[in-house]
Image (cartoon, rainbow, N blue to C red):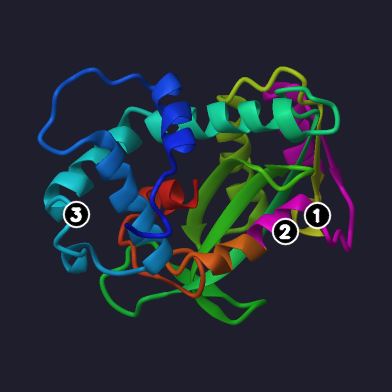
Amino acid sequence: MYETDLTDFQWQVIQEIFPDIRRRKHSLRLIINTLLYLTKSGCQWRLLPHEFPPFPLVYYYFRRWQADGRWARLNQALVRRHRQRAAPSRQASPSVAVLDAQSIKCSERGVRDKGFDGHKKIQGRKRQLLVDTGGLLLAAHVGPAHENDRVGGKEALKKLAQQGFERLDLVLADAGYDGQPLAQWTREHCGWRLETAPGLTGSGGLRWSGKCGQNRVLSFECHERQPPTHQTSSL
């Protein structure tokens, strides 16, 4: 019906990861199609087309799967599956991750936990993104735009440590994450080396950030009131 709808193959993959045998008035495939349409179009929840399920039901599933970690587990499973098929090493787990940040503007009203990024002159939020060298998103953290990269980066690294990528050994970042305390914390709590490369460009993180422009919810303005909701939309 819409370009954002799951193909039969995509739905089959999701069913293999999260089998669902319960009978429902609205199928989970339709629920996910609704969320994909919302992310791509950037429309408000209440303005979803009538052929989709009622927005309170869709929002209920979105927040429920956010709370129980299903979105993160689904993202991890899809990353592993894709890497086994397309990564040069054919290994499900990456050995190198790239950490990068992106500040985005927010709506003027009704958005919590936003701030002002004095360096980029942006009022809004900041996304801390961890990706593999191919640009696949591994973990994300969302905070106010004024949040220090080392503070936000640590939160993103905590989420990455929960993903269980067994081959991960090195995290690359730009000069914004420089400093012995963060490198030492990463080594002690995650078992990885954190190395900064001033002027790092063309990285997977920057490539992933460019993909955000394809989705209105993630591109220019952020309309999500809750940072965790924004964070899950990034996944």
Nearer to us in this view, 232 or 108:
232
- Res 146 seen here: no
Instruction: Pick whichever of labels 3 and 2 is earlier in the sequence.
Output: 3
| Rendered view: 211 above or below 109 | above
x, y percentage for residue 28?
A: 26, 35
Horizontal side, residue 82 vs residue 167: left or right = left
| The label number, if any, that marks residue 69 in the structure image | none
The residue at which mark 3 appears reads as 52
| Rendered view: 39 above or below 31 | below
Q: Marks 1 and 2, how far apart in space?
A: 6 Å
- Is 191 covered by the magenta stretch? yes
User: Which portion, as a residue range, is magenta?
Assistant: 180-209
- Circle 2: residue type: Arg
The residue at which mark 2 appears reads as 207
| Rendered view: 220 above or below 96 | below
Label 2: which secondary element: helix
Q: Residue at x 38, y 22 (%)?
A: 18
| The label number, if any, that marks residue 203 in the structure image | 1
